[in-house]
Image (spheres, grey):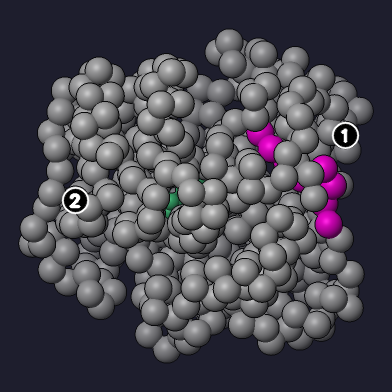
Amino acid sequence: MNYLSTRGQAPAERFCDILLGGLAPDGGLYLPENYPQVALAELESWRGLPYADLAAAVLGKFIDDIAEAELLRLCRRTYTPEVYRHCRPGADAREITPLTPLAPELALLELSNGPTLAFKDMAMQLLGQLFEYVLVQRKEELNILGATSGDTGSAAEYAMRGKRGLRVFMLSPHGRMSAFQRAQMYSLQDQNIFNLAVRGMFDDCQDIVKAVSNDAAFKARYRIGAVNSINWARVAAQVVYYFKGYLAATRETGAPVSFAVPSGNFGNICAGHIARMMGLPIRHLVLATNENDVLAEFFRTGCYRPRAAAETRVTSSPSMDISKASNFERFVFDLLGRDGARVRELWAKVDAGGAFDLSGTAEFARLPEFGFQTGSSSHADRLATIRLARERYGVWIDTHTADGLKVALEHREPGVPMVCLETAQPAKFAQTLREALGAEPPRPAGFENLETLPQRCELIDADAVVVKNFIAAHAG
Ligand SMILES: *Cc1c(COP(=O)(O)O)cnc(C)c1O
């Protein structure tokens, strides 16, 4: 299996070669040269597989430069009930992503049972195993540099902690994360994890990462890598749970199922799109946004208009507060018949801070073939949906999952199960849960005293030179 760039000007590469990098050299994102197909008979044969074995079967279609037995071993190490243990009372942790029925033809797929209580653990934990495997094979080391406003950084740290050949340098805005998020990251005591609390905002952290990464000599000398959401292996790992959710929601292979996906950077739902392109009988992919509705706007109007930072709202579903959706380029590449030259043209506008408009084009007219439906949610909608979930269905849900459920309920169809992806646990967003329900959300076992654990971080000025010096002193 070869990988090509959405901008059409990068040489084809194999899976392990694109694993450790980020963008393709032409600035595009990697995608497989074609989508492997899964016939219904094969899909049927996967029914009843444990999650790890299903993951190896699905990922094996995208990875042909890791031996089959090795890939299975890595998946079995990743997807264990010990790692994904924070499931709902009554759910079976051996399922890894249990399906919780809410009503006939309506269910939640639990994706947030991993160590950081958000769905990013589903892919990031596998990434940790894959990185270690490839680095040991190649006798190489990697220093991961990232910026986080909360969820991604902690998922990366919990995936990479204690891994050979890997160090993580994670920048976070000092005093701007919730006490829970801060404790989650800063309480890690592993020697290969470095938390740098920056006197500044998240944007300052991101600017520093960019500045360091743009210094090609420094980047090469210290082998700087990234684990951001455009990483292909993360998207591929997410394809697996669409297959899992489909099989759990159906008795008969071939029956249609819809998925509702709380969306920000378009990574999660991009995996759904790929599962559908592989032949999984997905009827609709329901894309839910919060007040930051740049994606819903495109599907409605054909105009993709990334927002300026000042136009990006701070909401109570903060992991969806995005101004531009970094994985969206992958979908547009498919929508345009995989025409890299046109993607290059469109993203020349985006990269210059502009917008593009596909309304009136033949390609935009074909959009319905891809099965998307969209909707948006507000803070008031979130509160109402959190209450509804508690009162009508007897479940606690977090603010992001609430955005998904709100839009899902607007798009149900008789005879088509609607599977809502649960992307985080309510304990992470206790303040909004209290506002909605007047009660404290349940904390999974092991998190009771999180905020009182000893913390370890380095407080620094918002200065790329300081960060470079720190890396140089600790990169070994
Ligand atoms: C990252 C995240 C999202 C958005 O997912 P994308 O892949 O960026 O679309 C939604 N909910 C939660 C809780 C997240 O952490």
Question: What is the magenta range?
Answer: 29-36
Question: Does residue 244 appear to the left or right of 203 in the view shown?
Answer: right
Mark 1, residue position: 337
Residue 283 occupies quadrant? bottom right
| Image vertical order of residue 259 relative to residue 139, above or below | below
Mark 2, residue position: 186
Residue 456 in the image: state x and y as whole percent.
13, 49
Question: Does residue 343 appear to the left or right of 421 in the view shown?
Answer: right
Chain-order first, disc 1 or disc 2: 2
| The one of 199 and 263 positioned closer to us in this rendering | 199
What crowding class fits label 1: few (fewer than 14 Cα within 10 Å), some (14-19), or many (20 or more)? few
| The one of 122 and 245 positioned closer to us in this rendering | 122
| The one of 104 and 158 positioned closer to us in this rendering | 158
Question: Does residue 110 appear to the left or right of 248 in the view shown?
Answer: left
Verify whether residue 33 appears in magenta.
yes
Picture residue at 13% right of the left edge, 68% below the top = 449
- C-alpha gap between disc 1 and disc 2: 45 Å
User: Three-letter amino acid code at disc 1?
Assistant: Gly
Picture residue at 81% right of the left edge, 19% below the top = 341
| Image vertical order of residue 99 relative to residue 234, above or below | below
Residue 336 occupies quadrant? top right
User: Three-letter amino acid code at disc 2?
Assistant: Tyr
